[in-house]
Amino acid sequence: MSILHVENLNVTLNTIQGEFKAVSEFSLRVDSGEIHGIIGESGSGKSMMARAILGLLPHNASFSADYLSIDGINLLNLKPQKRREIICKKMSIIFQDSANSLDPCFTVGYQLDQTLKVHEKGSSIQRKNRAMELLQSVGFESPETLVNYYPHQLSHVIRQRISIATTIASRPLLLIADEPTSGLDPTSQSQINELLLRLNVRNNMSILLITHDFAILSQRSDSMTVMYCGEIMETGYSYDLLSHPRHPYTRALMDSVPSHQHNDMHRKPLFALKGVVPPLHYLPIGCTLGPRCPQANKTCVKKPGLTRDDNQPVRCHFPLNDKELS
Amino acid sequence: MLNKSNIYIQEKIPGPIAEAWHNFRKNILASVALIGLLVIIFLALASPLLVPYDPNFQHENAYLVQPSWMEGGNPAFIFGTDDLGRDLFSRMLMGARLTLGSAFIATVVSLSLGLVLGILTAIGPRLISTLFLRFMDMLLATPSLLIAILLTALFGATLFHATLAVAIALTPHFGRNIHQLLEEELAKPYVEAALLDVPNIFRNVFRSIFPNLFGRLAVQMMLSFSIAVLDIAALGFLGLGASADSPDWGRLLSESLDYIQIAPWTVTLPGLAIFVTVLCINLIGQGLSQALDPEKY
Amino acid sequence: MTYYVLEADNINKEYLTKSGVLRMDTRIKALNNVSLKLARGQTLAIIGESNSGKSTLGRVLVGSETPSTGSIRIDGTKLDDASTRLRREAHRKIRLIFQNANQSLNPRIRIKSLLDDTLRFNTPLNAEQRDAKIKETLKLVGVRSELAERYPHMLSMGDRQRIAIARAIILEPLVLVADEPLAHLDMSIQAQILNLLLKLQEELGFSYLFISNDLGMVKHMADEIMVLCDGQVMEQGNSRRLFHLPNHPYTRALFSGHPSLIGSSDAIVHVKKLYKSATSKTEKGCPFYSRCPFASQSCEKSIPELEYHDDVAVACHKTNEINALSELHRKY
């Protein structure tokens, strides 16, 4: 059964430059215990999509969807109050700068306790035990000393871990991780990634992992979605998608990351898409990738729909096939 | 080959000044205030040409004439006359000159002094920096009126001394603020980059940092200007500022205070003038800070 | 003998901070006896965790901070006993590409006058020559010259980073210190900038000091690698060799999240304690001691010296032991 089911989600932003869609026709299913990766550049709408699902959109944004359910409960039919309750109980999010989400005025233990008060019933001793358990589950061997520290006394990674502990305090079914490792050094990156994986395996927690790291997706994720300018470009099982990308954009992104090359490319120029990601209010006509696509032609001024190629939805008039790859 | 700009739709991004002006114009209240202040400044500057009468001429048989729009008013005296038969409109116009002029001078003087102190304390040697910072703290702790009273007690009550006193009182505000702003900017990477290019800190303060401070300094100037107007008027009211034959708005207020029962307009109108001017200045200041930093609001 | 454009010998950098209730002065060692040599056209990558002194090393070398002790030699000029004028002259040959072009470009100065200032104060060129030089440099980094009339915020992120590179190379330096030059960019733009850096090196023969957290990029770019931990060199040597088989447990731990990058997967070490504790900092021992799975008493007592094995230098008391272990691992 799918934990999260989204059909045809649209997010509209209203800014000084006018109204435009930050996310359009977005559909997604995340199964129980699955890690689903979302990959895309800035402005691809990946964060907006996550915020729309959680009801955390900024005030100048509005969203519409055909269907939005979590754990089988259709959120669209609910009153706002009830919807918030369900979202709060079933989902959690880790932001990129979650490390700074801790209040500098209170100790780590106090803050964790406050979060637990909301989600758990029970005495303060029970809560304390649960807090220790949570801190242990995010990889602290001796959390007893840690709870007395103030956030500024701890390093960035430790704070990031603690904030993960607070987000999983509600035992969510789905954890949305919005670039949890960007800006961290290699060891910290792998620590956070290991931690997410452990949560996934031990607690059977589904994870929606928003990232721009192909390596982590190929190692960890079950399925993935590639986004560009608010649209799904391609989606499917990670193994299939990464071994045989259908969309030229996926291919281009993979080719532009040196750690994902098969043969030795040392000091050779990488493949780079021309130009820049267009601003959302000046999207090109037709295929959004059109002006940057290495194999665009006349047909591409018509907007491609999300078609199934080999049971793998892809938004391109000319999906790549395997022969071209070899 | 086609020109690149024809393929991509180019996005027009305005420069910093154009952008600030664009944001400012959207703020209706601030725009109205700007027009209001411009009118007031124009009236003040052109007052010698506009005044219908000599402000000190005492019209016989026209004592305490009501403003023209009231019953018993005389169209010849738009704002009425005071107890000695002097035309209030002419006196207020000339007063605007004095009040706004001296407030402006006080602001400019304190800005220049504040710049010197701010720069000195931000990039100067530690001893000098600490010395001046504590000195400014001392000034900040002294009420501006007290400084004015001291000055006038020593040198006599004139508008010049009142202006000087206000300037001295405002200086530490500027100095502290500029010091703070410079400290903030000096820690930013673009200054480090500029120092690697041109290792001359003085030049970099003026060339690299100041363009980034203009907006915030302008806001601070508007705030100080309004404080200066109020202070000058207050000193005039207390008799520590302008002399009786060339009265500013504060002096006008205090002169007619005795007649507030029988001739309320002689007090209300100068008071209203001060109120409107300060309101306009503050609205512009707020509009400016919003225009320069739209995301904060 | 190889000619080195940049030589640094035993660089130490200490910061004084006040801490505790009594505001006592405490010394924090940001760099501890770091030495490096950089030949023309070579790329030396510096990797390590955050707070390992990577950025400090870069800033010391470009002259934005002075080392506490140690000597730096740029293009043959020894900096410590040089006059101010000579030192400025030498520092023109080593330039910094800042991490975030958003912050390093002055938001209120047009690109052109920014570059013009740099030239005016560092070269004897006249206005026309400067103008020509700016045009030439912009062309080199692939920015249309009409964009020079703009303010930084009017440019795309990629173009801003190109301008930051233009600013560094406009004085025709020998060494470029690039501190995370790609960290804030999108994937497709990262590749563009990386290609640009490679092209510039090819054409103009720059040496790079490449500071990065992205091991993929490091593997792609670097000839040599230096691994820093708490300001100390843990391992240093040929990039291919190091990526094929890292020796130091710390390096292995750094690579642990990216098994695809290194040659033999048995080289990965999973460290005991995953996080660095904020309080316990070993004063005299190996900085990796508290987390190292191979640590013994000798590691706690003394800082290991850099020892050369072929073309890789390792600072570890346990090198032989670990090598024997991986040998064993490989056999079975």
Image (cartoon, rainbow, N blue to C red):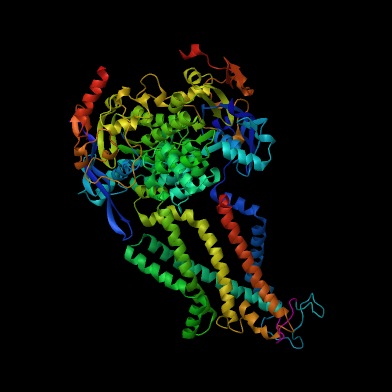
Q: Name the residue nearer the viewer: C243 or B9.
A: C243
Can the viewer see residue B86? yes
Q: Name the residue nearer the viewer: C118 or A166.
A: A166
In the image, taking residue C279 as reference, residue A261 lies left or right, namely: right
Can the viewer see residue A267? no
Q: Position of residue B102 (x, y in %)?
A: 55, 73
Q: Position of residue B101 (x, y in %)?
A: 57, 72
In the image, taking residue C125 as reference, residue C80 lies left or right, namely: left
Q: Position of residue C309 (x, y in %)?
A: 19, 28
Q: Name the residue nearer the viewer: C3 or C315.
A: C315
Q: Position of residue B151 (x, y in %)?
A: 48, 81
First to last magenta residue range: B78-87
Asked if B238 appears above or below C249 in the picture, the reply is below
Residue pictured at 45% horizontal, 52% vertical: A104
- How many numbered discs? 0
Asked if A322 appears above or below A216 in the picture, the reply is above
Is the stretch drawn in magenta largely helix, strand or loop? loop
